[in-house]
Image (tube, helix red, strand yellow):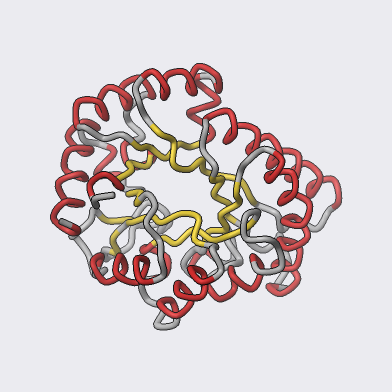
């Protein structure tokens, strides 16, 4: 498969487009793969979205997101698990085999990172077999350490693999996102480890630009605008045996303020420039 054929546009990159607009823009640009997010899918309708994707000839590469497993209170944990079972079912209906998980941050008042990670493992133990029965893999995403307190206690690929490797690879693997791992000099070795175990379930791109915006969530840069050597990371992934889709997932207020079709065309051009 050529690099261009591996391109997938994550819905968040062009979130200003409705699902029908996204499908039309992909058709006009020759894009055949998309990563979807649960909230807009639920708003449009799960089965309606699945039909729209099929009719447009689009393959859904991932569904974002499940997770947020770190609550201590039993009822809150039960609610999270129920929501994640729904997310698995949604992924299966959309025809994707990959549900991306963000672990969740520290509960209010807690400073116990190891304990929070253990609760993630407990949730994976329950959710993994359920996902397998639906033909869905769980991709545990690493988030940059700046998100450890409020969003994701899994901050390195080593931590993610230490969790994932407790379970069969066809149940639990990892999502590799350049934005979150580019700073980590151990990440290439961990990508090799993940590849050897058949645990690379998703690969996403975003560039690191500064200064970070207030709140830091929506500061992911367009490919080529920041500090990340995309070719090098693609090389690490391919050396590890990964030949699957490459999603571009950007959270960026300036991009969202522009015409979404223009952003899609620009993203595809930047991807070509980085990889072709």
What residue sits 55% from the left and 19% below the top?
A: 47
Query: Residue placed farthest to the bottom in the image?
Result: 185
Give percent across and percent down for residue 56. 34, 21
What residue sits 72% from the left and 56% below the top?
A: 124
Image vertical order of residue 69 relative to residue 182, above or below:
above
Give percent across and percent down for residue 255. 25, 42
What residue sits 32% from the left and 57% below the top?
A: 206
Choose top left, top right, bottom left or bottom right for residue 191: bottom left
| Residue 178 left/right relative to 193 | left
Observer-nearest residue: 168 or 79? 168
Give percent across and percent down for residue 127. 73, 49
**Number of marks:** 0
Give percent across and percent down for residue 31. 26, 35
| Residue 272 left/right relative to 204 | left
| Residue 191 left/right relative to 24 | right
Image vertical order of residue 131 relative to residue 206, above or below:
above
What residue sits 15% from the left and 56% below the top?
A: 276
């Amino acid at each position: 498969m050529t690099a261009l054929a591996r391109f997938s546009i994550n819905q968040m990159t062009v979130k200003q487009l409705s699902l029908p607009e996204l499908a039309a823009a992909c058709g006009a640009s020759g894009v055949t793969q998309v990563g979807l997010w649960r909230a807009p899918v639920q708003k449009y309708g799960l089965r309606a979205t699945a039909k729209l994707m099929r009719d447009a000839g689009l393959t859904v590469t991932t569904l974002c997101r499940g997770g947020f497993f770190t609550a201590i209170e039993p009822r809150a944990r039960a609610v999270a698990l129920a929501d994640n079972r729904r997310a698995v079912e949604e992924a299966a209906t959309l025809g994707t085999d990959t549900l991306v998980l963000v672990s969740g941050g520290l509960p209010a008042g807690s400073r116990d990172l190891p304990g929070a990670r253990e609760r993630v493992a407990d949730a994976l133990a329950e959710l993994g077999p359920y996902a397998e029965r639906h033909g869905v893999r769980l991709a545990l995403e690493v988030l940059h350490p700046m998100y450890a307190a409020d969003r994701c206690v899994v901050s390195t690929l080593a931590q993610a693999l230490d969790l994932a490797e407790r379970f069969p690879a066809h149940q639990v693997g990892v999502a590799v996102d350049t934005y979150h791992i580019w700073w980590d000099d151990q990440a290439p070795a961990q990508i090799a480890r993940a590849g050897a175990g058949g645990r690379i379930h998703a690969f996403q791109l975003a560039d690191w630009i500064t200064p970070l915006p207030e709140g830091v969530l929506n500061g992911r840069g367009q490919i080529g605008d920041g500090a990340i050597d995309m070719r090098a990371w693609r090389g690490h992934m391919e050396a590890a045996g990964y030949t699957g889709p490459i999603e571009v997932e950007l959270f960026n207020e300036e991009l969202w303020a522009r015409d979404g079709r223009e952003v899609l065309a620009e993203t595809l051009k930047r991807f070509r420039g980085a990889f072709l």
